[in-house]
Amino acid sequence: MTADVTLKIIVDALPLPTLIVGADDRVVASNDGATSILGDTMVGRHYIAALRQPGLLEAVEEVRAGKARATALFAGREASKETVYQVHVAPAGQDIFLSFEDQTATEEAGQMRREFVANVSHELRTPLTALLGFIETLMGPARDDPGARDRFLNIMAKEANRMTRLVDDLLSLSRVEEEERVRPREMVDLGELLASVIHGLEPQVKAAGVHVQLQNHGDGQKVPGDHGQLAQVFTNLIENGLKYGGDGEKITVSLDPQTHHARLRGIGIKITVTDEGQGIAPHHIARLTERFYRVDSHRSREIGGTGLGLAIVKHIVSRHRGRLEIKSELGIGTQVAVILPTEAVS
Ligand code: ADP
């Protein structure tokens, strides 16, 4: 067996994408993992041509010059997705071993966390700036103006309420995420749940001058679920109908009998909340469940939206192994359907 064949057998046995640079500075062996990162033409080539990225070349040079080990980051692109590897470079006799540790998921999680913190800070800063502005005015020029004081205090209360809603939604979201892998165990009567949600929303429904109609009561149909979370799903959906619907419109909540749903690959019950509001343009629909995504941020904030309602809905539905479908037509209205499995699925 030649030395190169032996090296190939060794790299094939290793779990990480690995390649070996030989004494003549050419790549002598690589396993499938390394080939899928760097392409299948690198064996036999000089390592400078095969690896290309300056940080990694530097690490190899350091090891060649006698360093016991070195690491470098390697940015790749696989199946049109950006990837990031931490590459461990170490000498093995005259050869140099390079093993690639995939850091993509960690990088992505870090990026998401940074974006999330930036979004939350931005959302909190807007009402805080308003509050500070009014406090300053009340302490200064408007100190002895009772009319202005009342007006400003009203706005301040509105801003403070907005911050409370945001913090409440953030806490709900983190609770829901925490429990996402825990299967709900109670059996929830959907008709009863919807009737109680609609009852709880009566003051807002009256204030909006809207009619909410529950189309049928489901004859005691039950799903395995978390009562509080499912109530939150339908509260958020009906509230959206109220927020983005027109005056005097109707919101219909329908509860279909259980049947086979292809999207669920099983038996489920579909609940649909339909409004006759302004509707949503098609290119927004896929992104509505992202945190803080809004079609019109200004309008959403104005009417007390946090941009988190549908993100919470999506997480709760996914904890229940259900499906969420949003259909909408501009000027006609929006239909949001939740399909929940009637049997616990693994
Ligand atoms: P928000 O707190 O802003 O309402 P959501 O996550 O509940 O946040 O909804 C995200 C965005 O989706 C809203 O800002 C709004 O633009 C749009 N949207 C949600 N439901 C409806 C609806 N029934 N009709 C029209 N637009 C809607």
Image (cartoon, grey):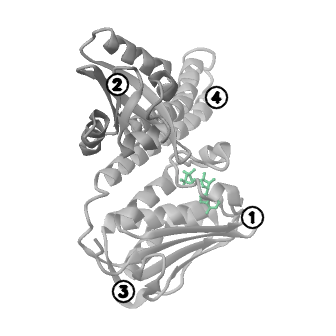
> Mark 4: which amino acid?
Ala
Secondary structure of the residue carrying tag 2 is loop
> Mark 3: which amino acid?
Gln
Q: Going from the N terminus, do you reach mark 4 or mark 1 first? A: 4
Which residue matches tag 3? 221
Secondary structure of the residue carrying tag 3 is loop
Query: Could you tell me which residue is drawn at 29 percent across and 51 percent down?
Result: 178
Which-is-in-front pick, marks 2 and 1?
A: 2
Say if mark 3 contacts mark 4, CB within 8 Å.
Answer: no
Q: Going from the N terminus, do you reach mark 3 or mark 4 first? A: 4
Secondary structure of the residue carrying tag 1 is loop
Q: Going from the N terminus, do you reach mark 2 or mark 1 first? A: 2
Q: Residues within 10 Å of mark 4 (few under 14, many from 20)?
A: some
Secondary structure of the residue carrying tag 4 is helix
Which-is-in-front pick, marks 2 and 4?
A: 2
> Mark 2: which amino acid?
Gly
Q: Going from the N terminus, do you reach mark 1 or mark 3 first? A: 3
Residue 157 percent location from the top left of the image: 51, 38
Which residue matches tag 4? 148
Give the CA separation, mark 2 to mark 4.
80 Å
**Which residue is more in the foreground, 286 or 196?**
286
Query: Could you tell me which residue is drawn at 40 percent across and 73 percent down?
Result: 196
Q: Quadrant of the C terminus?
A: bottom left
**Which residue is more in the foreground, 109 or 287?**
109
* Left or right: 190, with 201 as reference point: left
Which residue matches tag 2? 22
Which residue matches tag 1? 330
Q: Going from the N terminus, do you reach mark 2 or mark 4 first? A: 2
> Mark 1: which amino acid?
Leu
Which-is-in-front pick, marks 4 and 1?
A: 1
